[in-house]
Image (tube, helix red, strand yellow):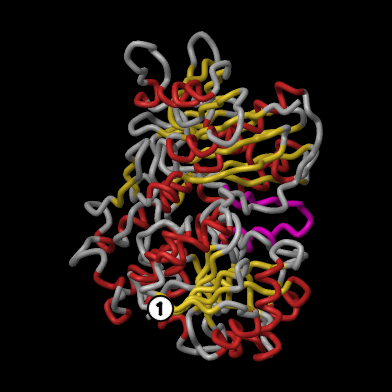
Amino acid sequence: MNYNVLGVHPGHNGSAALISNGKLVYYLEEERLSRFKRDGNPFRVMIDICSKYKIDEIVIGGTNDQNENIILPWTGENILYSLVRKYNPEVKLTKLNLEHHLLHASCTFFNSGFNKAACLVVDGAGSYQERYITEKQTVDGFEGESIWIAKYPGDFKSVYKTYGKNYPPRAIIGEHDYDDACTITKTYEAVTEYLGWHAIEAGKTMGLSPYGKHNPDIPPLFKNGRGNRDIFIPNYPSGAAIDFKNNSILKRSREADVFHKNPKELLDIEADLAWQIQNDTQEEVAKLIEKAVDLTGLNKVCIAGGYGLNCVTNYFIKKKFPNIEIYHEPISHDGGTSIGAAKIIYHQRKNDFEKRKQTSIYLGPKYSLKKIHKTIKNYNNMFNVYDDITPENVAKLISENNIVTIFQGRSEAGPRALGNRSILYNPTDPNGKDFVNKVKKREWFRPFAGSVLKEKAHEWFDMAGLEESPFMMYAMDVWPDKQEQIQAITHVDGTCRIQTVTEEQNPHYYKLIQEFEKITGVPILFNTSFNLAGDPLVETIEDALETMLRSEMKYMYVPELGYLLEKK
């Protein structure tokens, strides 16, 4: 008999995940349906799940923010539980919002396929916790970084944890370390805000970093594993800030976003600071991996937390630790904690020891082809629709430097487009990066990814011992003799974030890349997320069509119907 556990993350990147008999069968973030970037409180996703599945237990995560505990009038229920109870009167409620890092650790461990592992969580600010050590000693603060020993069915032991607050002096008591300095992720957020973006948009800082270099005038960003308090001012649980008063070199003389659209406006200090924070944080994460191995005695490490999406650091770590098995969780940001919440409760409830490595993250809702066809027909005044289209037809269009979007199947979980909700282009076009960045209305320096046939990946990229990279979690070195051939996706430092593709994983996408190779000799497609700057990835066919109409993009491929849409 099925036992269905619904995990919910109510905070930013709000999400819901369904575990059915131990298997992750559905995951979606609220922003995909509400169209509100980083939206929380995933009511629309929960309604979609509850309308399709019987729910036996709901597990609510979060960070124990006071607003998460607001109750409804009359029934006195938690609002998220109340919604599920109206569909499933017998549903059980479990709350795990006191243990945010545990949920990150659970997500990455149960998805890794490891039997026992060390879990490293590198996060901004998790749950506010108080830990009583002795009658006279306590530690309290927001979770920053943590190390766990994880094993089946659902045993997690914390062996190291940092805590952050805005004012206490540093204290180290046993495995607990707390002070008023910034965590690794908070320092990265502070630099990201300094450069003119929202703190969570750290991927933009990562993209800018190769344009900089070591600058001896920039003071040390870290001291003893913590953000240098002379540079960074914490603001837990929110972001952090640069201390301009004590760092004249970093003082602003203009608006922070001046260089976003104009490369000539980029100052050396801006590029150098981006380089420095990327370099220094990846070195700090490497130290934590060594600590995790030393503390646990294990050579299998699972990584999660918001910093886990840093694909430059992920590749750096793979090359630095070739003898350690490292799993990088593709849904490592806060949205993935809904998966962790549901997984740990399921395994504990059912005493389930079965390992289930996550091999696919096409986990969004299923849409009927009949409905997709009907919706497209409603837009016939705006699009020409060609049927009986072959992958060869589409590959030829792309090879002629046409942007072609693709819409198929279930949407990808997490922030990476993996060929179901993607914008595709010709990676051999030397002007491709500038062209597509302009069309997407993104900053000029931001790089793009490549989707490559798995069996050809080693010919084009230094895979650092990896056999595949299906979730686009690593910015890998492009072999020097190949960089000129794929200039559109080779970043200024000679790297490219890649997704390997097999026919089993995504047959339509695989066939399209094959046909592109027949035409160009290159087994790779330029791939970026199907959205415009500031928008969530498209989810429904309506989202896709409306995005086409709001942009300069002309073609959309719907392989399951054999359609090519051309905007009139």
Neighbour class for label 1 at 10 Å: few (<14), some, many (≥20)? some
Q: Is residue 121 above or below residue 66?
A: below
The answer to which quarter of the image holds residue 559 is bottom right
Residue 208 location (% of width, % of height): 42, 69
Residue at 36% from the left image edge and 57% from the top image edge: 192
Q: Nearer the viewer, residue 353 or 161?
A: 353
What's drawn in magenta, residue-wise? 312-331
Q: Nearer the viewer, residue 247 or 77?
A: 77
Q: Which residue is mark 1?
A: 567
Q: Nearer the viewer, residue 65 or 55?
A: 55
- Three-letter amino acid code of the residue under disc 1: Lys
**Residue 147 appears in the picture as rendered:** no
Side of 42 where 475 appears, left or right: right
Label 1: which secondary element: strand
Residue at 57% from the left image edge and 47% from the top image edge: 332
Residue at 29% from the left image edge and 78% from the top image edge: 262
